[in-house]
Amino acid sequence: MIKQITLKINGMECPNCAMILEGIEDKLKGVKSAEASYRKTQLIVEYEESLLSKDQIKAEVKRMGYEVADGI
Amino acid sequence: MNNILIAFVTGLTSGGLSCLAVQGGLLASSLENQIEKDFQNAGQRKGRNKKNIKPSRSKLALPILVFLIAKLLAYSILGFLLGLVGQAFQLSPIARAFLQIGIGIFMLGSALRMLNVHPIFRIFVFEPPTFLRRFIRKTSKEADNSTLVTPAFLGFMTVLIPCGVAQAMMAVALGTGDPIQGAALMFAFTLGTSPVFFAVSYFATQLGQKLEKYFMRFVAIVVLVLALVTINSGLTLAGSPYTFSRLANSVFPKPQNVAAVATDQVAQSTEPFTDETITGSSDSEGRLLTINVQNSGYYPNEVHAKAGIPVTLKLITDNVQSCSRAFIIPSLGVQQILDETGQAMIQIPAQISGTQIYFSCSMGMYGGTIIFDL
């Protein structure tokens, strides 16, 4: 089942950090789409629940050098 | 001319690293092929030691150069198009003044955003749409191995993800209202960013996070200063009495740059090049105001004229190349391109006593005042 999660992200210094964050699409199997916004400081990820968990996504975001403030 | 130099210096000092932070990923992708190839070659020769790629660094120079040339080309075209858009809205000096002030506010907002003053300033940024970002990411990943095509293509793509400083420059290019000037401006800026881009990617230097933060603050301050200059130009162009130079003049008057003309009295001036002005202005029954137009502005930049009678403004140019040649008086709708060397006469209708008329170059960089108080 496809689920959607919105994460509040700290540490996006420039608009193109959004592009880097969206690279999560390629990094994690099970991510259907990722849309980040520098302006809103958030990342919306659509993922296949059977393949991926919220925590895995959060961990990957941290690995990419950003801080997850909290889930909305 | 000045603007182009400023663009180059901005690129050199602040554009390079801040744009690298944004576009470095693309450059890295374009180098990946080369590095991978070298890895394979090195692997075939001797083991898998990473250090083996070191001697091949010189091979990176070419893809980096190709990337940068493509980038230079793309931004010059962008500058041309922006100038063309600016030109399409062929603007009166007043409209251009407002555009300039708007651009200044955008730059000011960008600077405050970079300084992280408040999240609200994040509105002062252009975010490429998601589909475009996805497209760039995918193409950079799936780029083929035909070596130089990839860095060329990716260099071109950087135009879609301009950094904050580049965005500010783009706004200035739009404000020029001239495709050639717009292209020259973006070319100069991108050229300025190139040495840093090249050095950092060639030596694969990584700035420490702390240093990067300090650097971003420096960038923000450069943009802040540029913003104030731009706003000031806009104000000058609008003929506003509240420009920085006019405010400074009113606080600290500079008598040496003021010539009282249009009467029988000879103006007192210590400016050597205004000699001609003074001799030229003492005739014509007090109706002739003479101003020397120089590359660096108008001398004198404050002239006093007789009220109640039409006066003539005589503008003398002698091998003038700068924008001071494009002379405007916003309140009278006067716009005139002066000859590089020569004289131009502009008739000014009678003004009531106390009137102040502001004149400037078309970019608002230089200006002056005619005061009808004699």
Image (cartoon, grey):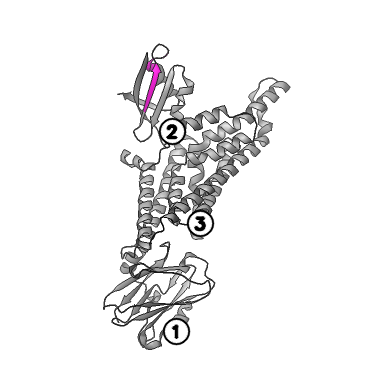
Give the amino acid at mark 2. Answer: Cys
Cα separation between marks 3 and 1: 35 Å
Q: Which residue is mark 2?
A: A17
Q: Residues within 10 Å of mark 2 (few under 14, many from 20)?
A: some
Return the disc, 3 or 1, that comes first in the chain's sequence.
3
Query: Given the current orientation, which residue lies at the most extreme front position?
Result: B88
Give the amino acid at mark 1. Answer: Gly
Q: Is residue B208 left or right of residue B67?
A: left
Vertical arrangement, residue B175 with respect to residue B195, above or below: below
Query: What residue is shown at x 56% (from left), y 33% (from top)?
Result: B28
Give the amino acid at mark 3. Answer: Gln
Q: Which mark is residue B280?
A: 1
Q: Residues within 10 Å of mark 3 (few under 14, many from 20)?
A: many
Q: Which residue is mark 3?
A: B181
What is the span of residues highlighted in magenta in the rendered image? A43-55
Residue B149 appearing in the image: yes
Residue B206 appearing in the image: no
